[in-house]
Image (spheres, helix red, strand yellow):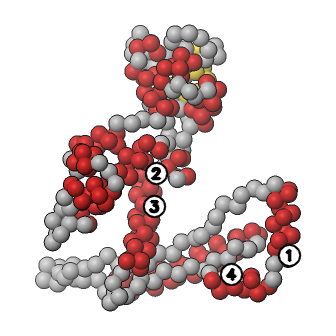
Amino acid sequence: MLLLLKSGISWKEFSDLAKEKFVTVATEAFGIRGRPTNVSRVAILTGLDRRDVAKLRTPTERRAAVQGFMSKPTQLLHAWYHDSRYLDPSGKPRDLEIEGADGSFADLVRRYAPGIPLVAMIKELRAAGAIEDAEGKRLRALKRSYIPRELNEDLVRLWGSVLQDIGTTFEHNLYRNETDQPRFERRAISLRVDPKSLPQFREMLEREGQAFLERMDDWINAHEVGSSIDEQGIGIRLGVGVYHIQDRVPRLTKKQARTSQNTALRRPAQEHEDDQNRQ
């Protein structure tokens, strides 16, 4: 969720994407003898209405569902670039007075982002680099859409493929047949690591993890099917991933910190050992 919010994805956009993916997977993965699942069964599996399922199975409808909603900040910026009330004679977005009646930024907020306080909208758009201050206590538009933090598209695709690989491993282990071998999935983790040891952990993980991955890469390369036409075989996507685990530590109040410390001091040593064994 944090990544989606930083990327400017609203709950409605996420909801529409989730609906599309639910319908796609239910259609492709639950059919009989390789045929697509019928609309009625997809509706039963997903909990969606049959009419919604039928629409989302049409490519143009899927695109419309995803693209048909904009967050309020994006609606506001879009209007700033297209509504004649906020354009200069050349058709470009003009610098707007912050307060005022028709044609001011406050008016723009009232029309396209009702319910959002004026000051809060200004702070958010400034932080996202979508607006800047102009002369005469005015605001200037810099972007047509609201994205709190710009992300590299290639990195997003990479992260998506990593999450998909982890999810596929979990799915296989949860629903595999008794005759299928489980896929390796292990973690080494503790809840009480001294934060001062983080640099040492990073250094060790990068050294040992890189060495392990290089050995695995050599093995995978040695077992690839041939590249020429005569040597072509049916290959499978196979590999292993290593990743750094670290949670954000919430900032505790003084009272919470004292309570946590006292609880830790009273806790039996055996309970700590049991935690380590469970991990």
Which class describes the residues within 10 Å of circle 4: few (<14), some (14-19), or many (20+)?
few
The label on residue 159 is 3
Q: CA distance from mark 2 to mark 4?
A: 39 Å
Which class describes the residues within 10 Å of circle 3: few (<14), some (14-19), or many (20+)?
few
Q: CA distance from mark 1 to mark 4?
A: 16 Å
Could you tell me which secondary element the residue under label 2 belongs to?
loop
Could you tell me which secondary element the residue under label 1 belongs to?
helix
Residue underneath mark 4: 275
- The earlier-in-sequence mark between 1 and 4 is 1
Residue underneath mark 1: 265
| Residue under the point 39% across and 21% down | 82
Q: Nearer the viewer, mark 3 or mark 1?
A: 1
Q: CA distance from mark 2 to mark 3?
A: 11 Å
Could you tell me which secondary element the residue under label 3 belongs to?
helix
Q: Is residue 109 above or below residue 136?
A: below
Residue underneath mark 2: 152
